[in-house]
Image (tube, rainbow, N blue to C red):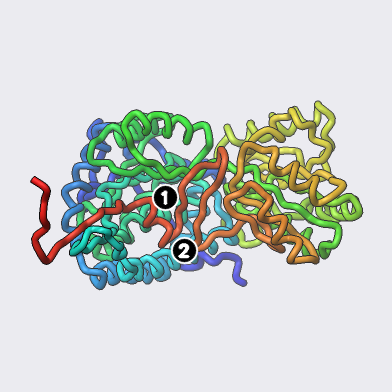
Amino acid sequence: MSRSEHAGAAWQKRDVTHFIAGAWVEAESGRWYPNHSPWSGEVLGNVAAGDGEDTRRAIDAAQAAFPGWAAVTPAQRQRVFLRAADIIERRRDEILLALALETGCGIHFGRVQVDFAAALLRQAAAQGYQPAGQLMPSDVPGTRAMAVRRPVGVVAAIAPWNSSLVLAGRASIGPLSLGNTVVLKPSEESPYTGGALWAEILQEAGLPDGAFNVVTHAPGEAGAIGDAMLAHRHVRRLNFTGSTPTGRRLAEKAGSHLKRTVLQLSGQNPLIVLADADLDYAVDAATYGAFIHQGQVCMCARRIYVERPLADRFMAAFAAKVAQLPTGDPRDPATVVGPVINEWALALLQRRVDEAVSMGARVLAGGTPAPPCYPATVLTDVPDDAELALGETFGPVVLVEAVDSAEEAVARANESDLGLAASIITGNTYLGLELAQRLDAGSVHVNDQPVNDEPHMPFGGVKDSGWGRFGLGFAAEEFSDLQWITSREQDRSFPF
């Protein structure tokens, strides 16, 4: 492989504006903020600092476009999505470079994102040909009844920075494929790869003006955008991917507006290694599952439970492999652990690791920051009341614990208030499947690590990891309404 898969791609500083009604427009306030690269700190361009007024304009544009987009034929929709997939593949190297520069995403996870985005669009191209309802039996003689799905209207989408291309696409393409229109708020950390880039692609693909809109905002100013989305009467659904505390606040506000939400929130995902597992495979799977994209993926393994007969050998081999993971420039294809997203994230990682160590935890690998990176870090003997053990720590840190049995591992995993993803590695697949059904998690992967997703799968969590499911096909449950329609071919008699 050449030094860079971005060969031929070049980045020029670019300003990111809102995309509303098919036009690139500045914020009403005229304000901007700089978009910094997490690796170099360089300014990649300036970004429109939007507010509630910009959001309301975008929602009005989406509402105006809704009747036209909802009425297009499946073939017309299909052409748009297939063209968009081709555009992503044509721009592959450029997109990989943009992901590296804007979010610190290395080549390994960058490829995952680009491939997922193209697959998402190609699968969305078939969505219009899925059955839109069903005939229902009626006890009223002469009545024909149908339950028909129809698009809800404007969908507000709030996407995070950590998997910016995929999560912005997942938040938007499913609703669009069902005939809805979308207003997307990307993270202030990924306004281009999580927002404007999708607008460029969909506009070139021929999506009608106003069907997809993007509103950006400055750091610390997301609240005004979210509030405007929830309060606007034309917004019929909101989907959010992010932290549990933020999701809880959104859900509380959404309830006051009677707005349905789809929430995919934090994860503290367990990886269980049974005593009969292949050691080398378990180490390789755990390393990928814990440290892909420097641990900044909601599905990353945060806790590893190993049955005691294998625990010492696993910890030694795992720590040795992790200690050798290359750290540095995300544009270098050799890099596995790139920069964390910002200085605040780096400081939080170090504070939580230091606290755990002061409480008796042992560092098996890593543990010393190398700004702007934090090395892949493995800890054991972490007390249950340490912050690292209590919630999601978003970065390249994983906890390893020896357990006496598979039953204890499941019980320990289920103690968490979070339930996004989990995995089990065992030589006995049937036992793995039985244990999977006992784990409180939205997805469980037997003989794999927990970082898995496909566009058509029912992705989402349980407990405090959210509610609802993304995934084409399953998205119809979230982003369409069921309408009961009856018809009669003869008059009905009435008692008065």
Q: Is residue 43 visible?
A: no
Specify the quadrant that holds the N terminus: bottom right
Q: Is 188 placed left or right of 343 in the picture? A: left
Say which residue label 2 marks.
456
Q: Is residue 104 visible?
A: yes
Vertical arrangement, residue 310 with respect to residue 427, above or below: above
Say which residue label 1 marks.
194
CA distance for labels 2 and 1: 20 Å
Q: In the image, residue 133 lies at what x, y percent? A: 30, 63
Q: Earlier in the sequence, mark 2 or mark 1?
A: 1
Give, as a three-letter code, the residue at label 2.
His
Give, as a three-letter code, the residue at label 1.
Gly
Q: Is 71 placed left or right of 340 in the picture? A: left
> Front-most of 32 and 407?
407
Q: Which residue does the image show at 69% across and 30% down from the upper left?
A: 387
Tell me whether the residue at label 2 lies in contact with that at label 1, contact meaning CB atoms closer than 8 angstroms. Answer: no
